[in-house]
Image (cartoon, helix red, strand yellow):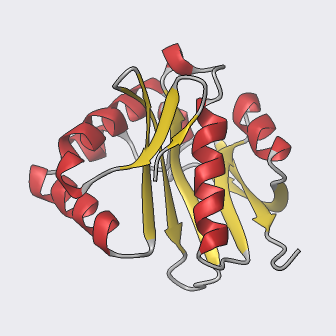
Amino acid sequence: MAHGLTACTIRNYTSDEWPLYRAIRLRALEDAPDAFGSTLAVEAALPPEQWAARMARSATSGIDHALAAEIGGQLVGLAWAKVDADDPALVNLFQMWVAPEARGQGVAAGLLNEAVRWARARGASAMQLGVNCANDAALGLYARAGFVATGWREPMRPGSDQVEQRMRLAFVHGA
């Protein structure tokens, strides 16, 4: 389902859009290498079949919600919500990123709002994410949306000097 912001549309990727997803994912990793647990080198080396399979699973699994943000027909952001493998009442948010030219226009809030809407609609009790402790803009976005720090912190990835903290948003159902 597409949700419109000022001039931005938030929508799901279709399974055949893996080349578009790959391009923006690699752009995100290049632009913000300290924002993700993966790296540009690792993901750029993935074969096309793996990208296609990732998008196909997203479109059919029922536990993935891969989101694209578009302005004027151009992809400018992405986010991925996924039901936790160990706790089906928990949805994790990954890969949140907005292109530099689209920042400050509500794109991140639109992506986050759609991910939260999806998690609530499927009956999740909470959503959680990891965020770089040095990313003040992201920390502020998540705090404004009601996410709170859980106290869990660790390096972004092995060998990184960047620290990630976990934030969580509890859902109140029936209210």
Q: Position of residue 6 (x, y in %)?
A: 60, 24
Residue 121, position in %: x, y? 62, 71
In the displayed structure, would residue 151 be above or below residue 136?
Answer: below
* Residue 159 in sight in this render: no
| Quarter location, residue 29 | top left
Check the image and report above or below for 154 versus 76: below
Indicate the quadrant containing the C terminus: top left, top right, bottom left or bottom right. Answer: bottom right
As rendered, which of 162 and 51 lies closer to the eye?
51
Residue 89 is left or right of residue 14, and the answer is right
Residue 137 location (% of width, % of height) = 73, 29
Left or right placement of residue 138 versus residue 175 in this view: left
Q: Nearer the viewer, residue 38 or 96?
A: 96
Specify whether residue 13 is in view: yes
Q: Residue at x 67, y 69 (%)?
A: 120
Q: What residue is at 42 percent from the left and 32 percent from the top?
A: 28
**Residue beneath the point at 39% across and 20% down:** 72
The quadrant where residue 136 appears: top right
Residue 60 screen position, x and y as percent: 29, 72
Vertical position of residue 103 compared to residue 97: above or below: above
